[in-house]
Image: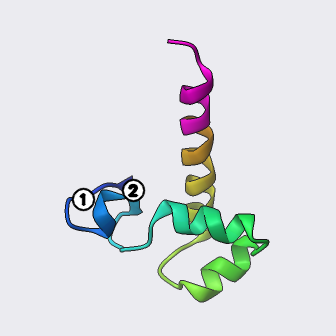
Amino acid sequence: MIETRAGVRSGKPCFIGTRIAVYDVLDYLASGMTSDQIVSDFPELTDEHVRAAIEFAAMRERRLATPA
């Protein structure tokens, strides 16, 4: 559901088939937007995409918090 592609949004993780970066969705959530508002503003996204963004952030945090 999430991929990075050279030349698309400077290689930032985006949702497959879109140019919408995962970080954009996380920023919208952090600013107080609801999942419904995000999906309404970006019809190519679904609630599943928003949950995938949250899971992506959680996994990244888990990797950072785990000692090497």
Q: Residues within 10 Å of mark 1 (few under 14, many from 20)?
A: few
* Residue 21 falls in image quadrant: bottom left
Q: Main secondary structure of the magenta part?
A: helix
Q: Which mark is residue 13?
A: 2
The residue tagged with tag 1: helix, strand or loop? loop
* Highlighted magenta segment, given as a residue range: 60-68
Task: Say if mark 2 contacts mark 1, CB within 8 Å.
Answer: no
Q: Which quadrant: the N terminus?
A: bottom left
Which residue bears the numbered disc 1? 5
Question: Horizontal placement of 5 versus 40: left or right?
Answer: left
Question: Horizontal placement of 13 versus 65: left or right?
Answer: left
Question: Horizontal placement of 30 versus 52: left or right?
Answer: right
Q: Which kind of residue does numbered mark 2 sit on?
A: Pro
- Seen in the picture, residue 38 relative to 40 is either above or below; the reply is above
Please identify the residue farthest to the left as the structure is shown: 6
The residue tagged with tag 2: helix, strand or loop? loop
Q: Residues within 10 Å of mark 2 (few under 14, many from 20)?
A: some
- Seen in the picture, residue 20 relative to 2 is either above or below; the reply is below
Residue at image location 29% in from the left, 63% down from the top: 10
Question: Horizontal placement of 22 versus 48: left or right?
Answer: left
Residue at image location 62% in from the left, 79% down from the top: 39
Relative depth, front residue between 46 and 22? 22
- Seen in the picture, residue 16 relative to 55 is either above or below; the reply is below
Q: Earlier in the sequence, mark 2 or mark 1?
A: 1
**Please, which colouring scheme is shown?**
rainbow
Q: Which kind of residue does numbered mark 1 sit on?
A: Arg
> Looking at the picture, how far across and down is residue 68, in whole percent?
49, 12
Q: How many marks?
A: 2
Residue at image location 35% in from the left, 64% down from the top: 16
* Residue 19 falls in image quadrant: bottom left
> Looking at the picture, how far across and down is residue 43, in whole percent?
53, 85
> Looking at the picture, how far across and down is residue 42, in whole percent?
54, 83
